[in-house]
Amino acid sequence: QITLKESGPTLVKPTQTLTLTCTFSGFSLSTSGVGVGWIRQPPGKALEWLALIYWDDDKRYSPSLKSRLTITKDTSKNQVVLTMTNMDPVDTATYYCALNRDPGIYRYWGQGTLVTVSS
Amino acid sequence: DIQMTQSPSTLSASVGDRVTITCRASQSISSWLAWYQQKPGKAPKLLIYKASSLESGVPSRFSGSGSGTEFTLTISSLQPDDFATYYCQQYNSYSGTFGPGTKVDIK
């Protein structure tokens, strides 16, 4: 059974750095072709793709957010970590991690975690 | 960067109606398009991939078509469980850009 779960702070202050962890089970991020991505959704708004890391440590970022994002993996812990610097209230959103095993397709998602940016 | 648009943004329909949602890409994405359904407070659910392939377990009333830059999601006979927001997503480029969504609500 494949599961993913996001964890991290629910509240961050403007200018702070957000660190989110995706802990997963049921698959290995050392398997060829496997990736884990991050997608966010501001309240009442659309989904926005953020970043993706592959089994071979290849990393892809949203062009508009690339300067603020870092994605890393810890294969031994079955975790993927996303950091986003210089947080702003417009970054308030539910952040999801999702399995990318069939290239580009997100078939399995975490439940999401709501992050609010406020002073 | 590939941009995605969807129309309409909101669609009011009745149970039993045939519903069609259109998704357009700013450049050709071949058939590298997926459709997701999302209900309030839930993660998106994959419905269609590679433009027209039905995900396992998804009812056959859902279908997808198109290639290049124009795609459609059709629900042949809308059911009460289908009232939700639908997103297209391109995966031709390394970034999996999502469309702005189409909300299907009760007429």
Image (tube, coloured by chain):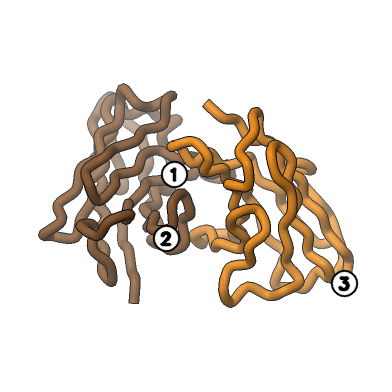
Chain colours: A brown, B orange
Q: Which residue is mark 3?
A: B16
- Earlier sequence position, callout 2 versus callout 1: 1
Looking at the rendered image, the quarter that the N terminus of chain A falls into is bottom left
**Which of pointers 2 and 1 indicates the residue nearer the eye?**
2
Tell me the chain of label 3: B
Left or right? Give the position of B22 relative to A40: right
The residue under the point 65% across, 45% down is: B101
| Residue with the mark numbered 1 | A40
Q: Amino acid at mark 1?
A: Arg
Residue B90, by quadrant, is: top right
Q: CA distance from mark 3 to mark 2?
A: 30 Å
**Residue at 43% across, 57% down:** A102
Q: Is residue A48 above or below residue A28?
A: above
Q: Chain of mark 2?
A: A
- Label 3–label 2 contact, CB within 8 A: no
On the same chain, marks 2 and 1? The answer is yes
Query: Horizontal and vertical percent for residue A31?
Result: 24, 60
Q: Is residue A49 above or below residue A78?
A: above
| Residue that carries the numbered disc 2 in the rendered image | A109
Camera-nearest residue between B74 and B104:
B74
Q: For the residue marked with disc 3, what is the amino acid?
A: Gly
SS category of the residue bearing label 3: loop
Disc 2 marks which amino acid? Answer: Trp
Q: For numbered disc 1, what is the local secondary structure? A: strand
Q: Is residue A37 left or right of residue B106?
A: left
Output the chain of dot 1. Answer: A
- Residue A5 vertical placement versus B21 (above, below): below
Q: Is residue B107 in view?
A: no
Identified at 45% across, 30% down, the residue is A90
* Location of the C terminus of chain A (image quadrant): top left
Q: Quadrant of residue B86?
A: bottom right
